[in-house]
Image: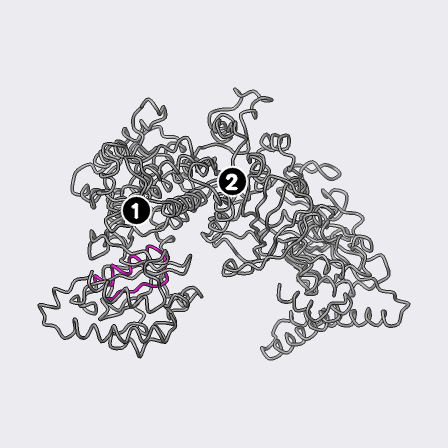
Amino acid sequence: MTKEEGKEKVKGLIELFKGSYAEKTASEKRAYNEATVREKFLNPFFDALGWAMASNDVEVEYSQVREDDGSKGKADYRFNLGAGKEFYVEAKKPSENLAAQCKHAIQARRYAYSANHTVTILTDFEEFQVYLGRGKAPKDEDQINTAMVSSLSCQYTDYLDRWDDIWRYFSRESVLAGSLENVPGVKKGAKGDVTVDALFLADIEKWRQALAENIYINNADLTPRLLNELVQKTIDRIIFLRICEDRDIESYGRILKLKSKPNIYKGLLALFRQADERYNSGLFHFKKESDREDFDDISCKIIIEDEPLIKIIDRLYWPGGPYAFAVMPADILGQVYERFLGKVIEIGERGLTVEEKPEVKKAGGVFYTPEYIVDYIVKNTVGRLLEGKKPDTAAKIKILDPACGSGAFLINAYQCLLDWHLDWHKANNPEKYTGKNKPLIKDDHDNYRLSLAERKKILLNNIHGVDIDSQAVEVARLSLLLKCLEGQNRHSLQTELFHERLLPDLDGNVKCGNSLIGRDFYDDQQGSLFDMEQKLKINAFDWNTEFKAIMADSGFDAVIGNPPYVGGSVFEEQYRSYIESKYCSYEYQLNMFSIFIEKGINLLKQDGRISYITPAVFLAQHYFKNIRDLILKNNIDYILLLNYKVFESADTGDTCVFQISKNFTKDHKVRHATIRKMEDFADIDFKIKSQSEFVANIRSEFNVTLDKNFVEKISISTVKLKEIAEIIMGIKPYQKGKGVPKQTESTVTERIFDSKTKSSEIFKQYLIGKDIDRYTTKPIEERFIKYGKWLAEPRVTAPFDRTKIILRQTSDKIRATLDEDRYCNLNNIYNIELKNGLDHKFLLGILNSKLFIFVYQSIVPEKGRVFAEVKKVNLGQLPIRTIALENPAEKQKHDDMVALVDAMLKYHKALQQTGLDSQSKKIIQDDIASTECKIDSLVYELYGLTPEEQRLVEGKL
């Protein structure tokens, strides 16, 4: 459908509407219902915009069991082309005056807000109203024009005049191209805007605090661990039942009615017990049964006063809160819970507090994987494993996330399986199924869907997860159970599973334990020496016992996920020694994600696939060589380097998505690509590299950013920096037990060698890393150190008393300058002294150039990482152009570089002067920019780069 063809079709609809409705009597208009409008006008209208109304792109909601305020049910239409390319349409009968009744606008906005859609449409064909969704939380006092996109809202008589705009934003081809992000008002936002995930997170964090305080006051002898568990379970149970209400699985308002009765918690417990009988999910285990030993016998005994529960209940229902839970996506709920689980209730001297977990603090935040990345990983693992299968063989596929968190990857994998089974059965004579246990069922509108029994079977057969955090396991199970119930309502459940419990028990599928530490952890240690809290923290996990049948059958078919990124400092020594003894990938710096890669490979059966998103540092950093060597014993299917900020709430630097198949083929080819923005995932431009190139590399580096020919070219006529220069780290002033005499604890804490004045010649002014930048030094005048053997590591061979290049250690790129003032410096600065007669300024120009930013970040993909560090071993490998000073042409290039760098140093020094007026500052900045271009051009010339190669370098910075 072209734009002009669509316009012509809408022209006919306008004439039809005039004749069949607009010119009718008032009573005839009132009899004109919503179903007729949808069939005669709205379906053809969106068809004119290029949407195939019977396709998977459009989900039509037929159920009329909804309230006008959106408190139950879903929107009438969901147009969906993937993440960020979806919107709802809420339909009404034409006799409803949309411009005068705010309740309809509120209803449409609540759907869009809760689903995190950019916009939503409210229409009865006679009127067409567009509202902003994302960030615009509806409130009871809102007016009809609140969050309305006036420039796109119109009457049916205006459709032809406004067709260009309607097509530009809502045609299928436009939405596919990302038009919804460009709707007026979407990007701009406004003060006070808050997305649904941020708002819901703020709410449940308040609930946690209020419940924790109330439970702690009213119930004696609660440990922090038990208090966390009780609070978490109470919130989870309420949210589960509230979502079931909005989905019409439970009667709407059951929880709300408890507000009018005394002892709300007693009423909640009654609902929880009913849920135990109805659902059979681990969320509501309150009594011992033959098939389950573990049950909750504490929640029923505690006291919770009404006040915190009233606040929770009020917020869960309109108008107290904006949420429409029937449309809230699983990944939104997952994002909220992932961040929620990053904190824990503590009981200490200050009383009850909520603190960030140490591992979250160390990692720099919570890493909730964006849905589009989860989707890509799942499609290329689970999706590929399903190719050519039948349901009986698909049932044998075992999928694992060994660090599942709130369950994002498991939910997506489960959805992938559900979609595949539905498509397979529909394509293979669906009418043949009869009897009680048939996998397909027809709904009231003659559409096929999987039976709940089939959905349960798929979940139990295929999906498995492990997490060390019991609360995360609880949430993952909750999310999977909600996914299992998706599309169901009270009527369908009663028809399908009369007198049966509705949900599977996931205790055997999603388990709590330490994926990396087995029960053999205690073999070389006396288990009795560990108290219960230590054992709970270690949480040893025996894979052969917990997944006995799977491990006996050689392991899992797919291992997927986003493993923890934390480094070794959060590990106690006993864990570290165990990891070192059990995992060959362990090197001197312990990083959990690399150990998870090894564990994942070990858990795979032959020909299985592992796919993770992790920091990209393991691709080339020297201390990840062991894990690279292990990976190279298998086939690398693809590597995607993600050269942008992937995680909103955490800084990790460059990340990568990769997939490994557990087999080995000689001359295997690796697909690789660099992704610079989210949109690039829609059409990835893969390049091919032989895996043997990685093997041939002395450090087994997976260099996927630098083309082999490019590397060879810039290495011509060069030597490694370590061959022509001394690279020495600055002094380490303090460390207990070091220095002569050995430093004591008080020596370190009191910093006795530091001084604000130069008391004698042995006191040296010193620099720290943040004092230097490219071509710049900003020393602090009143900072000296008493230099000598009493320092922990005085670095006596460092050229502190000579001219040298100094380079900042904590950075994701090279930041260097020249020190001609002979400062001392600390161990977050490298000192570089040339040994070959070249001027230091020549080397400085090369190191600070765009080419070397590109080369360094290609070798060490740490761009954007909060704690990125320049390593000596990586500096030493940099290819430095040799210069034959006896050759006049070569010497001229050397001297030109020295002159340019000399100018840069002077310009930067001038820029630091106090009292500079804005015009003078602008002139100096222009001089710096011009000189920098000349330095870059000279470096390109020195390394022989073509104009095309120069554009490649500059385009990737």
Give the secondary structure at mark 1. Answer: loop
**Quarter of the image with the N terminus in it:** bottom left
Residue identified by numbered label 2: 558
Depicted 172 relative to depicted 360: above or below: below
The picture places residue 201, in percent across and down from the top left corner, at 37, 49
Residue type at the position of mark 2: Ala
Q: Quadrant of residue 705?
A: bottom right
Describe residue 747's horizontal placement relative to residue 464 as left or right. right
Q: Which residues are magenta?
A: 103-123
Q: Which mark is residue 487?
A: 1
Describe residue 35's horizontal placement relative to residue 611 as left or right. left
* Label 1 packing within 10 angstroms: few (<14), some (14-19), many (20+): some
Furthest toward the right, the residue is 886
Mark 2 → mark 1, Cα distance in angstroms: 27 Å
Residue closest to the eye, 243 or 603: 603
Residue that appears at 73% across and 59% down: 709
Depicted 162 relative to depicted 263: above or below: below
